Amino acid sequence: MARLLARLGRFSSRKPWLVIVGWIVLLAAAGGAYLGAGGSLASGFSIPNTPTQQVTDRLNSALEGVGGAVGTVVFQTDDGSAFTADQQQAIADALADLEGLDDVAQVVDPFATAQQQADQGQQLADGQDQLDAGAAQLDDAQTQLDAGRDQLEAGQAQLDAAKAQAEAAGMGEMLAPQFAAQQEQIDAQRAQLDAGQQEIDDNRAELAEQQEKLTLGQSLFDNASGVVTVSDDGATALGAVVFDATLFDLDPADRIAVPDALRDADIPGVTLEFSAELTNSLDGLLGVGEIVGVLIAAVVLVIVFGALLPAVLPLGSSIIGVGVGVAGSLAFSGVVEMASVTPVLGVMLGLAVGIDYALFIVNRHRRQLRAGASLDREAIRESIGLANGTAGNAVVFAGSTVFIALLALNVTGIPFLGVMGTVGAVCVLIAVLVAITLTPALLGLVGPRVLNKRARAKVGHPDTVVPTVKAMPTWRAIVSAVVAIGILLVAAIPALSLRLGLPDGSSEAVESTQYKSYMIVADEFGAGRNGTLVVTAEPATPVDADDEVAVLRLQVEIEDVLMAQSDVAAVAPVGVADDGALLAFQVIPEEGPSSVSTEQLVAALRSLSPIDTDLGATTLGVAGQASGNIDISEALAAALPIYLAVVIGLSILIMIVVFRSLLVPLIATGGFLLSFFAALGAVTAIYQWGWLGEVFGVHDPGPVLNFAPVILVGVLFGLAMDYQLFIASGMREAFVHGMPARTAVTAGVRGARAVVTAAAIIMISVFGGFIFSELAMIRPLGFGMAVGVLFDAFLVRLVLMPALMHLLGRAAWWMPKWLDRILPNVDVEGASLERDAAAASALHGHHGATARPVQAKAPRTVGSRR
């Protein structure tokens, strides 16, 4: 590999414009492919077969439109007064015009809805008055009927007495016709009274049915009283836009069309704010913070190289690599579901590793030129080839570890995370290819100007002073290890209280419309309106959807159970399936979607299922933003140990092969775990606890981004392997060439310290620039990566690892002989190539002449039988 890369480096330096134009053509092709074939990016996240997704799918199949995304539009008067009739009409017209937009299923006019609620309340009150009046009329009729029946019974008694007297006087037969006529009249009156009684009874039964319906309706109305669309002072109103598709499937262009259309309406005296479902999640993809981060990286490069021109090379090559990687990945967004945060991760990784990888090669080339005898064209090209075969070989290996770690995100079984990992891996792969092709081409183009004038003047006159290398004192190694481990463990403490979730509107930038919308809704209508839940109920025996009373009974029975739960502010029926097998309810929590109480409410509602109703056991399901976040977070938390085990296993195997040691991989992996958990603890302290919130723009602390830990594992593992490689390989080379083990530790650190420090500062700068991104999901990722690199590079690799290696001494390089025999000999830094070049240079008298390297015998490795 080293020789192949050396030939590639020499070719690129001889044909610089061919390579440069080739990459520019690739960049144009990737951009064209994105513009021509790229699709939309989803602003939401979805994992198949989660409970929330199952409920959503059931809703979509049984109740059309209920499972679609819902965006909120907040209307508020500028002066705080109640909306005028003209403003209400203008808002209603503007909302009505939205129904012609793509994917908009329906809109909710807040004033029409408020009027309907008021009318419904009045109808319930009027209905009760009417029922009370009807009941009073029936009572009066019953009283009159009872009086008539008493009179009739009295008449019957008189007739019976008259009959008895006539019989006693012997006049019964003579008066029988008269008595029969009177009895007939009494019987007719009795029949009339019985008919009247039946009518009263029928009316009472009908009245009882109406009363039951009214009582049930009143119960539903009372439960839904918290679901209002106009504030108490009449100055704020909530409109709703219901889409045909879910948030994950919705075309962003269709979402953005809604606020654009409403802003064009330009309603006088009314301010509009929009929820996150209606905003462009890619706004602020690259902002001031990201640019500042790159500028800091540029300053570091200028300081390291002591000149502007060589500092520009890593920046230029990394930007081209990022363009190719991100645009090329986005070209597949039309056929692969891709979250909006995915390309941002590609930009972050592409910039950071692209700059660092080019830095390693440029730095190696500059070092070789300063130590060389000539700056003629052929010597420069040979130096470029050697730098590409040595440092470039290490770059390929380091990039491969990052590539594999990111690609391994697919083993989590979570589609959106696998796509993120794949895109990140592709961007890293492009960064490696750019580093080993475009960087040598640019170096060949700038020629000797890669060194400043002072350095060029010293070429051929090397400094003969060789610095003395001494092992660090053992006491310093002990103190360094204890202090480093202590700092990392303390930093990791907050991770013990880690809560995972997705950001809501409260975590957006204070000046953003999403944040303003969220806070207005929370202040005027309650925080729970920002995290509405949808609860489904499936009775064992379907309800007769045509029987209004039966439906109302079941709805009230279920709502009573829901309202009895803690932290439920309101419940409203949403719909009933045509077959009566599914009922849906809107549940408003007391607090927002990311609150602990809402998470507990979701768990409580799910634990209730099944509940007993008149129609048998009824199964409950929960959907909505809060439940979806919980499901995704649980799936990610379950995937993290598996992924961590894969990464750790990969780490140990790779380093056993590279360093031919058993203890070095354990030290390196243990250090990686410490830096990972320390980074996770720092993220928890800042974004969940709110520490230093003013510094990092965390105004409303909440759960940590649920996929941040998994992403941090993949990224930090790869970067940790980079630093481990550049430091530990120097230690190993010094040791196998005869230097004492503890002295070799100092030599390895001294040789790699400057470049690792520069590389780490550049990565921290680039990642740190994303801490102040306008995208809420990017900020914790940027911070976690930046602080993770800070911990790993400066505490683990430069302090803890050397200290432990010193304490272990020669034992650090122990390897069983049988294992040493079967392991391949991996020369990740191209040491054999460097020895060949040194031998060739010696044969030609150090005159800068070029010659094909000759094969030199490799030194014996520790534990080898050679």
Image (cartoon, rainbow, N blue to C red):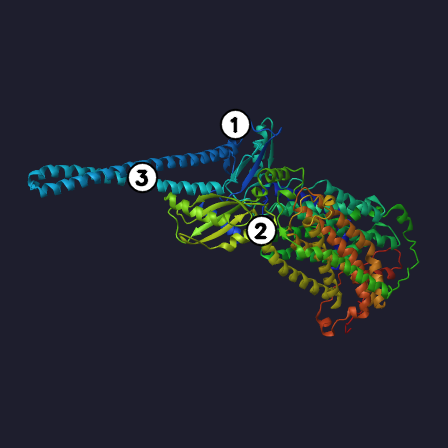
Measuring from the top left, give residue 352's x and y in whole percent: 73, 49
Q: Which residue is depicted at the point 73% across and 54% down? A: 788
User: In the visual, does 188 lie left or right of 139?
Assistant: left
N-terminal of the two: label 3 or label 1?
Answer: 1
Residue type pointed to by label 2: Glu
Q: Evaluate if marks 2 and 3 touch, with contact meaning CB atoms under 8 Å apart.
A: no
Determine the CA span between mark 2 and mark 1.
Answer: 39 Å
Residue type pointed to by label 1: Gln
Disc 2, SS: helix
Q: Is residue 323 above or below residue 2?
A: above
Measuring from the top left, give residue 237's x and y in whole percent: 56, 34
Determine which of the numbered discs, if any, sits on residue 89 in the image.
1
Relative to the observer, which residue lies in front, 195 or 301? 195
> Label 3 belongs to which residue?
203
Count of numbered circles in the view: 3
> Label 2 belongs to which residue?
599
Disc 3, SS: helix
Q: Which residue is depicted at the point 19% across and 41% down? A: 157
Relative to the observer, which residue lies in front, 839 or 594? 594
User: In the visual, does 246 lie left or right of 771?
Assistant: left
**Which label sits in the foreground, 3 or 1?**
3
